[in-house]
Image (cartoon, rainbow, N blue to C red):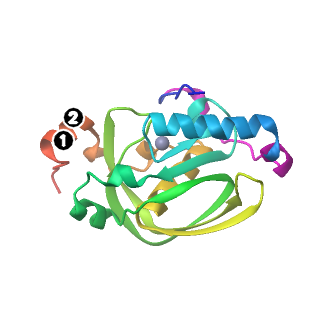
């Protein structure tokens, strides 16, 4: 079932979410939620969706960067972003350690539809979390995947990319396409 994605201004996006127990993760309610969030993310389409974005105060996010999303993007853009497909997976109760230098790229969010901004993110991210079965999972990510992880973990602690963006680069997507994200340096 497709879920309603809430937009900036909704209090759920600004509250730190609560962790889940392995028993909760294995239960029918959370398994249904994961399936619904996967469907909602694909339908949007997006590469990540966190539970607060569907109004739920839970430390859970789904992530998937599909081959078909990358097919029509210029190879130079993919290379600049170090973007490669990421199989569907779930992160629960993540502990994130950013690593490496900060890298700036434009990013967007399903909770701020129609907008984008340049956001500095660490080049790499190490995440320890539980997976969709409640088992521990250790992730070492680089490039765009590291950015997705940082964006989604932020959601679970009440943060949005607009808190971290270079505010003078904030743009409608329409103007971003027209002007290519040009800005005074
Ligand atoms: Zn987001």
Residue 51 falls within the magenta-colored stretch: no
The image position of residue 19, as x and y in percent, is 75, 47
The image position of residue 51, as x and y in percent, is 62, 38
Q: Which residue is mark 2?
A: 174
Residue 23 falls within the magenta-colored stretch: yes
Q: For residue 24, which quarter of the picture?
A: top right
Q: CA distance from mark 1 to mark 2?
A: 5 Å
Q: Mark 1–mark 2 contact, CB under 8 Å?
A: yes
Q: Residue at x 54, y 42 (%)?
A: 49
Which numbered disc covers residue 50? none
Q: Quadrant where the N terminus lies?
A: top right
Residue stretch in magenta: 9-25
Q: Residue at x 74, y 43 (%)?
A: 18
Kindly give the residue lying farthest to the bottom in the view shown: 100
Q: Quadrant where the C terminus lies?
A: bottom left
Q: Which residue is mark 1?
A: 177
Reply above or below: 181 against 5.
below
Reply above or below: 88 against 146.
above
Q: Residue at x 86, y 47 (%)?
A: 23
Reply above or below: 88 against 82.
above
Query: Observer-nearest residue: 158 or 140?
Result: 140
């Amino acid at each position: 079932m497709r879920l309603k994605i809430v937009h900036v201004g909704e209090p759920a996006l600004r509250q730190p979410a609560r962790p889940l127990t392995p028993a909760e993760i294995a239960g029918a309610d959370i398994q249904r939620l994961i399936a619904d969030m996967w469907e909602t993310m694909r339908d949007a389409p997006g590469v990540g969706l966190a539970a607060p974005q569907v109004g739920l105060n839970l430390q859970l996010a789904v992530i998937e960067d599909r081959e078909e999303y990358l097919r029509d993007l210029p190879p130079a853009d993919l290379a600049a972003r170090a973007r490669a497909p990421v199989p569907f997976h779930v992160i629960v109760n993540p502990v994130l350690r950013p690593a490496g230098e900060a890298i700036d790229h434009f990013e967007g969010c399903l909770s701020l539809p129609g907008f984008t901004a340049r956001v500095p993110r660490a080049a790499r991210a190490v995440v320890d979390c539980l997976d969709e079965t409640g088992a521990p999972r250790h992730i070492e990510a680089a490039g765009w995947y590291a950015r997705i992880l940082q964006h989604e973990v932020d959601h679970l602690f009440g943060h949005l990319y607009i808190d971290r963006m270079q505010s003078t680069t904030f743009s409608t997507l329409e103007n971003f396409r027209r002007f290519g994200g040009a800005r005074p340096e």
